Amino acid sequence: MHVTSYPRCLAWLLMFAGFAGGAQAVEFDEKVKAPMARGGAELRTQAEGYSTNFARLRDASPLEMVLNKSLAQEHFEIKWQLERALEDKRPMEDLSPIGLVKDGDGFRIDFNSFPQWNPFSERLATLMPVMINQNVGPQLIARGFRDSDVAKLWNYVATHDLKAATSARTLPMAISFSKIVKKYDKIKRPAGKDAVFSFLYQRGKVEAEVQRAWAEGLVRTLDDQRVRVLYSFISEYQAIGHWSPDNVETGVESLLAVMRLPDYEQRATADSAGVTP
């Protein structure tokens, strides 16, 4: 479980078995397997490499951090590896120099000091839908925004519902995975952890891209100067992350139980449309 705490009553909770969206409507692919968990020096090297790449783009410009698809994908991959390493209790070397401080059986992260673990695009997707209900316009104007810039920002957030869009786009993936689970049950080959992780991995990849694309659409409504102002403003929100392992067995069984529901497709479709079945 990854929990990010913000002041001013802002919070972001990412659950192991939670449902969100994807970059496009695609079905679950049985042939695509989730990467095996790493640990030790191999995981440290991957985490350090990502941190170096992030720093390079951050020094270039805030806009580049949002536009770069490769960096967003790298961010997803290393987070996936870290989650699996925690859940599998793999031995890990000291990662505190890059912000991952051991805290019990997980990590505590100061995202302001180590923003690579909570990058600009992720913060925008997390905070902007909340900020639209807060009176931050005057604060942005005091920093260099114009009234028209604030209007563009609010209009984008109001007309681009990230949660609804992503839920709708991954609906085919969830439905197809449910059908495969039921198919396995019929032939007495129950789906297990590997199948669930493959589903979560595939879904997570498209989630990461749709979130980045949403943030790209937002920053493209502004010029470079206003993007820098927004980056500075967002970066001042103090955020502490707590990453800890979930109960994998319970999570797997819970997700499979949902996928086995006889009316799962109808329920998922109604939920995606915001309708109570």
Image (tube, helix red, strand yellow):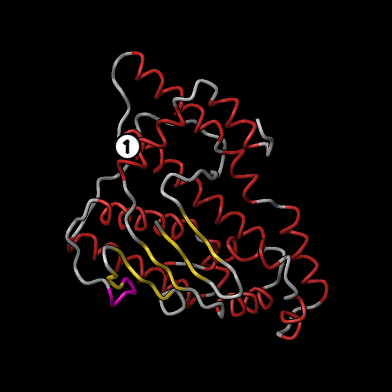
Helix or strand or loop: what does disc 1 sit on? loop
Q: Position of residue 138 (x, y in %)?
A: 77, 80
Residue at the far right in the pictured view: 147
Q: Position of residue 235 (x, y in %)?
A: 55, 77
Q: Position of residue 153 (x, y in %)?
A: 74, 66
Q: Which residue is mark 1?
A: 33
Near-viewer residue (254 or 163) = 254
Could you tell me which quadrant the N terminus lies in?
bottom left
- Indicate whether 198 appears above or below 68: above
Residue type pointed to by label 1? Lys
Q: Position of residue 227 (x, y in %)?
A: 64, 73
How many numbered circles are shown? 1
- Kindly indicate the quadrant of the structure image that contains residue 97: bottom left
| Residue stretch in magenta | 96-100
Near-viewer residue (176 or 193) = 193
Could you tell me which quadrant the C terminus lies in?
top right
